[in-house]
Amino acid sequence: MSASPAPDIGSPPADEPARILRLRGSVAAAIERVTPDHTAALLLLLVGAFLVRALWLNLPQGSLIFDETYYVNAARLLIGIQPPEGAPWHDAPLYLDPNTEHPPLGKALIAASMLVFGDNGMGWRVPSLLAGMLAIAALYGIVLALGGGRRMALLATALYALDVLSFIHGRIGTLDMLLVGPLLLGMWLGLRGRWLLAGTVLALATLVKVPGLYGLGAAVLWQLLGLWTLWRHERRPRLRDLRPTVVLVAGYALVVVVGLWLLDLRFTTYTNPLDHVTRMVGYGMALVQT
């Protein structure tokens, strides 16, 4: 009698893949049952982030924090308030921006807030508070646009909202959060394929502070990586694939040039945007050299 073949103990039963799939489905369903509603969790995170930033926003009462002494006093001049004796630019001309190493938009936003809330902590800091909240919401959208799940987006957003620099600059009257908010919003718009809007918003960030240019660089680099991947698979370039990059750069350049020209006409003595750009670049280079 011939011996029966030995069983292959290393091979799974025929129905094993189906059993694994059923088990995975059960685990996923259990996780979904215990996972809180992501929309409610996001709203709770945004409300909490807003409250901790808005709490005691007007304190220390009547005192400026850190670089507020430069930007708030510049904003005061824009609305015809002379800074106090000993403060930066206390003797500068009214209605002109003395802080010409940066574009005027950020200080104009602070000045507009002061017209609404007064020359106090609320007036100085509300723009940064709103821009900080915009940055938190935009980061959530960026994670989703890059393919992350809602839980990953919530985690990334929560970590950013609790970051010390995000918290501090989201409640003081400086230009930093007025830069970061539009930068993140512009990147989210770009990832959603709204390249003209992305270029416009990134340009507004640059009109607050020159490093907004890095946002354009990051967006262009992202597009070039996508084009390289596409061309590597198709083995031939297509001019239409360059359209998003052209739209992004053209929209950005138009808004920066026209926006800086209009802001300068109202808030500075520069009549040519190139002259102001030369001043800002020269100031930055002098800081690097020192």
Image (tube, rainbow, N blue to C red):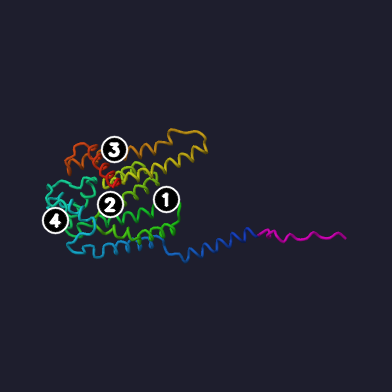
**Of the residues under marks 4 and 1, which one precedes in the sequence?**
4
The local secondary structure at tag 2 comes to helix
The local secondary structure at tag 1 comes to helix
In the rendered image, which quarter contains the N terminus? bottom right
Residue found at x 29% / y 60% = 168
The local secondary structure at tag 3 comes to helix
Within 10 angstroms of label 1, few (less than 14), some, or many (20 or more) residues? some
Q: What residue type is labelled 1?
A: Ala
Count of marks overlaid on the render: 4
Could you say where residue 86 lies in the image, as x and y percent from the top left? Answer: 13, 56
Task: Read off the residue under disc 1.
Answer: 145
The local secondary structure at tag 4 comes to loop
Instruction: Tell me whether circle 1 and circle 3 mark residues in contact (CB < 8 Å).
Output: no
Q: What residue type is labelled 2?
A: Leu
Could you say where residue 261 lies in the image, as x and y percent from the top left? Answer: 22, 39
Could you say where residue 282 lies in the image, as x and y percent from the top left? Answer: 26, 42
**Of the residues under marks 1 and 3, which one precedes in the sequence?**
1
Residue found at x 39% / y 53% = 141
Question: Marks 2 and 1, how far apart in space?
Answer: 23 Å
Q: Is 168 part of what is drawn in magenta?
A: no
Question: Predominant secondary structure in magenta?
Answer: loop
Question: Marks 4 and 1, how far apart in space?
Answer: 49 Å
Q: Give the range drawn in magenta.
A: 1-15
Task: Read off the residue under disc 2.
Answer: 178
Instruction: Tell me whether circle 2 and circle 1 mark residues in contact (CB < 8 Å).
Output: no
